[in-house]
Amino acid sequence: MPQRKEYIVEILLISAVIIWGLNFAVMKLMYRYFHPITFNAIRYVISSITMMTVLKARGEGLRIEREDVGGILGLGFLANTLYPFIFVLGLDKTKAGNAALLMALSPVFAFLIGVAMKRERFVPGVLTGIILSLAGAAAIVAFGSSKVSFTGAGAGDLLMIAAAVCWGWQSAASTRFLPKYGAVRLTVSLMVAGTAFMLPLSIPWLATQNFRAIPPRAWFGLGYSALLSITYSYFVWAYALSRIGVSHTSIFNNVTPIVAVLAGWLLLGEQPSLSQFGGVVLVLAGVFIVRSRKPMAIPGE
């Protein structure tokens, strides 16, 4: 019976990482109708309301202890306000495949930041993985567009690296709250806190968005991103963490960039170069080495 339950969890994880991989292309398609910040604000509001509803249906509440309020709010701002802003603006300026591959660096940054915070112990063998992954990222940025610059695709790639740093930072910092609140309650708490900060900051873009010009298929895409990519997949990830552990769960996220590259190719016509494929191999090999030494649970967008 335990093996069967583990098998079910793995099926759920596969569905989540496929959803995440497709979401990169879906979001870029939806940017034809929504400003990226408007799109982001609406999907986070929908996700927050849905997550709170699910949590209440489970008979749970947020119930954050007073001494942790400041830390949760700060972490929520980092994970679900600053990170999403950087993520959507970066994705708008680069390829869906590039974005997913550069986000795959998150576990590397999580480990390095964890070492800096003295929550992780540096292992010499990890250095090889870090070097490989950073070299792969450099290849993706260098060969993912006609030139590396601070405008256009080059800027988008750099923003995606910054987004990976933000996600890695929150992943490392959240480890101190996980034992007390559990993965599900912490996930919802950070989502609600981040959305509360995000919404007022997004008002200028929400106010200028022409909602009447948005076709039904665009709302369908927004629903996919809000309800499947965030709500469903985050809950699956949290459930998997509680059932099969961090290291086992983290392995599945390596599938996300592969799905994203294929989706970008099929849905957006993004054709990766041979040099980029080399970068893919280096990034995934480096991330695998880092995770095998000290794995971190890093969900994707």
Image: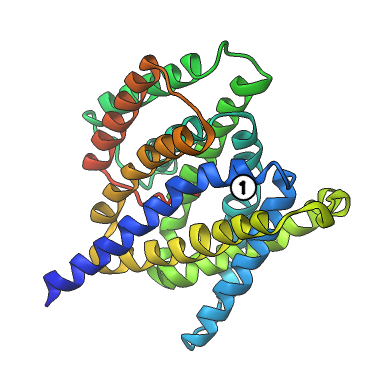
Seen in the picture, residue 111 relative to 187 is either above or below; the reply is: above
Residue 15 or residue 49, whichever sits in front: 15
Residue at the far top: name it: 147
What residue is rendered at 25% in x and 52% in y?
247
Image spot of residue 90 (x, y percent): 61, 34
At numbered mark 1, what does the secondary structure look like: helix, strand or loop? helix
Label 1 environment density (alpha carbons within 10 Å; few <14, some 14–19, many ≥20): many
Image spot of residue 58 (x, y percent): 46, 85
Identified by mark 1, the residue type is: Pro
Left or right of 93, for residue 115: left
Res 104 quadrant in image: top left
Res 109 visible: no
Res 48 quadrant in image: bottom right
What residue is rendered at 32% in x and 42% in y?
254
What residue is rendered at 23% in x and 28% in y?
124
Res 157 quadrant in image: top right
Which residue does the numbered mark 1 point to in the structure image? Answer: 84
Left or right of 70, for residue 56: left
Res 209 visible: yes
The colour style of the image is rainbow
Residue 156 or residue 296, whichever sits in front: 156
Disc tally is 1
What residue is rendered at 68% in x and 20% in y?
151
Seen in the picture, residue 87 relative to 270 is either above or below; the reply is: below
State which quarter of the image contains the N terminus: bottom left
Residue 58 or residue 121, whichever sits in front: 58
Residue 93 or residue 22, whichever sits in front: 22
